[in-house]
């Protein structure tokens, strides 16, 4: 009797997507990842019962049996079990990653069959045929990866091609166009391949701001800088893409651009878990902080889990490069002790930093109102914190931390202290420096504060900063994507209300980010959470979109008010409305334009 059962069917071909109902996802990891520095394939499965747990234990044996039949002699396996599911990983040859996903599924089906004492069809002939086809389509990949390894150059791989080196020194090969095979000799032109300095930025909050700061510091040093972040991809002054490019595709877009002399890449949790890192060697990386967010996805259930996910960036660091960490974050202090590698610390509180820094490394801290940077044993002042525009006269404490993180990371990757200091003296003075993050405008007698704040810590930081601004009344526009559970939604609302009592709260519906929720469901949970936190029912309203919520806030406002607007998906339209009001001479209490 066969243990194979088909259940998820492709809507186009009406064929099963996976081999068993217990399989949730099967995907390739092209670079360093949660499990290994090597590429491979990961299988997510449900295992809520004893039989599932036993199948997880049996899976590596089945993997090795099938891998041996394909001639894969160095396949490693790793498993990670959470309360509801498990992730099963195997390493694989670079020209066999698609085959590895099938192998992993067949091994899981076989493992379930062993536990259930059932028979399964022999998967070896199918896997051999698939691996043969895949190798024929990618005859060059292994040779190019070996070439990169022998010369200590970075290597990057995706569906479309692979590359050695980066930026001005990159050599990119498109899979469909290459004539190289696994026995090819590399001509002299490959000797010009080299790496430009590359930095990775990850964490729960402050990633985009820190990325933009480091990019600005490199530009201040006269280097053509490429960077990718949650708002797009840039090379120098040119924006190449708009949208969220915090995954491997954004990184590859920067790394393969022939003008780039230095690169800084915002690196989000989702991209690392879904595809791994875009490249295997970088010169620096920072984890800004760890905050409760995205729990329940990919088996991440605790702050320690999340810290471990963020530490994937350390797998790509060159041997001599330290990992930059926040000494004020307890989760990262614990993580540092587990990683067993060099760390460069930053801190807003000097007391925390003095416990961790050494006299021969990089560090940053605030002392006597100034931000200080330690660079290879020598301390330099970067200026008064209150004089740095991004800190809002020292009131935006989270941006002081972001400035410190950026300063240390920039120093690690070779940016001179003068360029770091000059950048901090001016960055944030204009809205174009850091769009969407703590944007403050005075319009018609009111103060508008716009920010992306998307988790409890980010919301608390935003509200604390806004609380330092004098106001007759205060309003908050609040919303959240649907991929947070109810506990996280409650925590977001509580963080806002406990930090600052608002005279009015407008809950916005985010229809473009329902992510499995029903319309109105997230808003209802946020409403209940605000009531539970102590908000009066008549102080809370609903809006059917982000822009509609902003318009409602403006209609409510009067001179002297502060409006704290969480703006996520309709930022361009909101900014256009603000520009229109400013140009027309609008004052609080006036009517709004209809378009």
Image: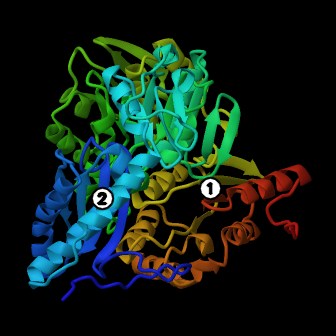
Q: Residues within 10 Å of mark 2 (few under 14, many from 20)?
A: some
**Vertical placement of residue 252 versus 436, above or below:** above
In the image shown, does 57 or 236 lie closer to the viewer? 57
Relative to 321, say whether 3 is above or below. below
Image-based side of 541 in relation to 98, left or right:
right
Q: CA distance from mark 1 to mark 2?
A: 70 Å
Question: Around disc 1, counting alpha carbons within 10 Å, would you say few (fewer than 14), some (14 to 19), or many (20 or more)?
Answer: some
Tag 1–tag 2 contact (CB < 8 Å) = no
Q: Residue 471's mark?
A: 1
Could you tell me which secondary element the residue under label 1 belongs to? loop
Q: Nearer the viewer, residue 190 or 243?
A: 190
Where 30 sits versus 273, above or below?
above
Residue 558's spot in the image, x, y percent?
74, 64
Q: Is residue 373 visible?
A: yes
Question: Residue 397 appears at what percent x and percent y?
Answer: 44, 41
Relative image position of residue 307 (x, y in whole percent): 27, 50
Q: Is residue 333 left or right of residue 100?
A: left
In this image, 13 relative to 56: left or right? right
Residue 275 appears anywhere in the view: no
Residue 123 screen position, x and y as percent: 25, 69
Residue nearest the viewer, comparing 344 with 188: 188
Q: Which residue is mark 2?
A: 128
Who comes first in sequence, dot 1 or dot 2? 2
Residue at 63% over, 36% down? 234
């Amino acid at each position: 009797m066969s243990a194979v059962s088909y259940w998820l069917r492709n809507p186009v071909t009406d064929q099963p997507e996976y081999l068993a109902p217990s399989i949730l996802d099967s995907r390739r990891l092209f670079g360093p990842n949660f499990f290994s520095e090597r590429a491979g394939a990961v299988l997510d499965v449900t295992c809520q019962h004893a039989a599932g747990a036993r199948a997880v234990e049996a899976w590596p044996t089945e993997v090795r049996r099938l891998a041996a039949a394909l001639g894969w002699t160095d396949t490693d396996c790793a498993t990670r079990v959470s309360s509801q599911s498990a992730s099963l990983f195997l390493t694989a040859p670079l020209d066999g990653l698609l085959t590895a996903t099938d192998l992993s599924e067949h091994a899981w089906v076989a493992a379930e069959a062993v536990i259930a004492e059932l028979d399964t069809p022999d998967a070896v002939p199918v896997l051999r045929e698939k691996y043969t086809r895949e190798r024929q389509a990618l005859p060059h990949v292994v040779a190019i990866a070996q070439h990169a390894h022998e010369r200590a150059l970075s290597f990057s791989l995706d569906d479309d091609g692979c590359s050695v080196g980066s930026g001005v020194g990159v050599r990119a090969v498109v899979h469909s166009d290459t004539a190289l095979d696994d026995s090819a000799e590399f001509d002299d032109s490959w000797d010009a391949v080299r790496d430009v300095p590359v930095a990775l930025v990850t964490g729960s909050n402050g990633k985009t701001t820190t990325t933009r700061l480091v990019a600005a510091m490199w530009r201040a040093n006269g280097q053509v800088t490429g960077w990718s972040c949650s708002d797009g991809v840039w090379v120098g002054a040119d924006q190449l893409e708009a949208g969220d490019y915090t995954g491997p595709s954004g990184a590859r877009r920067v790394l393969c651009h022939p003008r780039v002399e230095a690169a800084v890449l915002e690196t989000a949790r989702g991209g690392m878990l879904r595809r791994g890192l875009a490249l295997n060697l970088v010169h620096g990386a920072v984890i800004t902080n760890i905050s409760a967010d995205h729990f329940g996805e990919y088996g991440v259930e605790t702050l320690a889990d999340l810290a471990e996910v963020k530490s994937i960036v350390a797998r790509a660091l060159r041997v001599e490069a330290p990992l930059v960490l926040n000494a004020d974050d307890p989760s990262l202090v614990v993580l540092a002790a587990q990683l067993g590698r060099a760390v460069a610390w930053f801190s807003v509180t000097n007391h925390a930093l003095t416990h961790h820094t050494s006299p021969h490394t990089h560090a940053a801290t605030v002392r006597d109102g100034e931000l200080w940077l330690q660079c290879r044993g020598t301390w330099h002042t970067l200026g008064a914190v209150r004089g740095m525009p991004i800190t809002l006269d020292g009131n935006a404490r989270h941006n002081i931390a972001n400035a410190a993180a950026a300063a240390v990371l920039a120093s690690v990757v070779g940016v001179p202290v003068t360029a770091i200091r000059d950048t901090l003296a001016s960055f944030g003075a204009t809205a174009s420096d850091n769009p969407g993050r703590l944007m403050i405008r005075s319009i018609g007698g009111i103060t508008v504060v716009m920010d992306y704040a998307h988790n409890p810590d980010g919301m608390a930081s935003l509200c604390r900063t806004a609380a330092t601004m004098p106001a007759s009344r205060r309003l908050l526009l609040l919303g959240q994507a649907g991929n947070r559970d109810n506990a996280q939604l409650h925590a977001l609302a509580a963080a806002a209300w406990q930090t600052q009592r608002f005279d009015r709260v407008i809950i916005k519906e985010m229809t473009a980010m329902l992510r499995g929720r029903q319309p109105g469901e997230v808003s209802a949970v946020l409403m209940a959470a605000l009531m539970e936190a102590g908000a009066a029912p008549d102080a809370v309203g609903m809006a059917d979109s982000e822009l509609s919520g902003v318009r409602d806030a403006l209609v409510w406002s009067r001179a002297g008010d502060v409006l704290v607007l969480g703006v996520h998906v309709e930022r361009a339209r909101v900014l256009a409305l603000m520009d229109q009001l400013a140009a027309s001479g609008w004052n609080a209490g006036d009517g709004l334009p209809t378009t």
